[in-house]
Amino acid sequence: MKRFFMLLAIPALSLGLALPLIAQEKAGEKSELHKGCEHVTIDRPLNDVIRQVPEALRGAGLILAGEVDWSRLGAGAMPHGKMPGETPRLEAGLNVRTFLIADDYMVNEVRKDPEKALWLGKLAVFEKGGKTEIVYGKPTMHIETLKKAGIIPAEKADEHMKPAQEYERRIEQAVKTVEKK
């Protein structure tokens, strides 16, 4: 049993040491962890942008599957305050929203294989440096990364590439709609 845990501990330690190195950014370069994301800066109030996102997603033919308001979530297990069951809060003034996004292709894929529910698209809206930022994932980049790493076979990657490109086209359309308003 000890040997089993040692075998698990070595890769875990290696990963723990490697992640900070991978995540370091060189001047003007995105870190490895951010290469599959698109960043857009909008010079408008954060809450205006947040209110426009759901309509823009629907207008682009995407499905808003959920929304996370990070100011309502806690950073620790114990609630701040004295009321039992009170929701813990993150730092005051933190205003980040994550929108969970799907499309018809994804819904059909999840119906066939529920594990694919983890493919859910995400779009985050937050304030940084007095401007509103939108960050969203690009599934084509993730598919390519998985393919190059040998995690998924090339034919499977190719099968999902067109739907991923269509999803990206729609998410870009939704973000452009928010930018123009």
Image: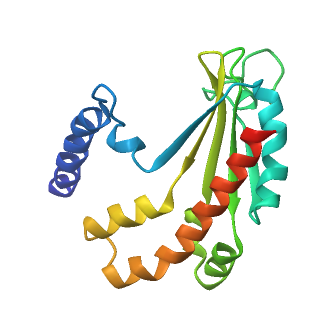
Q: Nearer the viewer, residue 32 or 178?
A: 178
Left or right: 15 in relation to 104: left
Q: Is residue 69 left or right of residue 27?
A: right
The quarter of the image holding the N terminus is bottom left
Query: At which x and y percent is residue 36?
Result: 43, 51
Please say if 164 is above or below 131: below
Q: Which residue occupies 83% across, 31% down? A: 48
Q: Is residue 80 above or below residue 151?
A: above
The residue positioned 49% from the left and 61% from the top of the image is 139
From this view, report whether residue 60 is shown above or below residue 137: below
**Picture coordinates of residue 8, whole percent (x, y):** 23, 53
Count of marks overlaid on the render: 0
Position of the C terminus, as image quadrant, is top right
- Residue found 68% across the figure and 21% down from its top: 94
154 sits left or right of 63 in the view: left
**Residue 69 percent location from the top left of the image:** 74, 36
Relative to residue 125, is residue 113 drawn left or right? left
Of residues 91 and 94, the one drawn nearer to the viewer in this rendering: 94
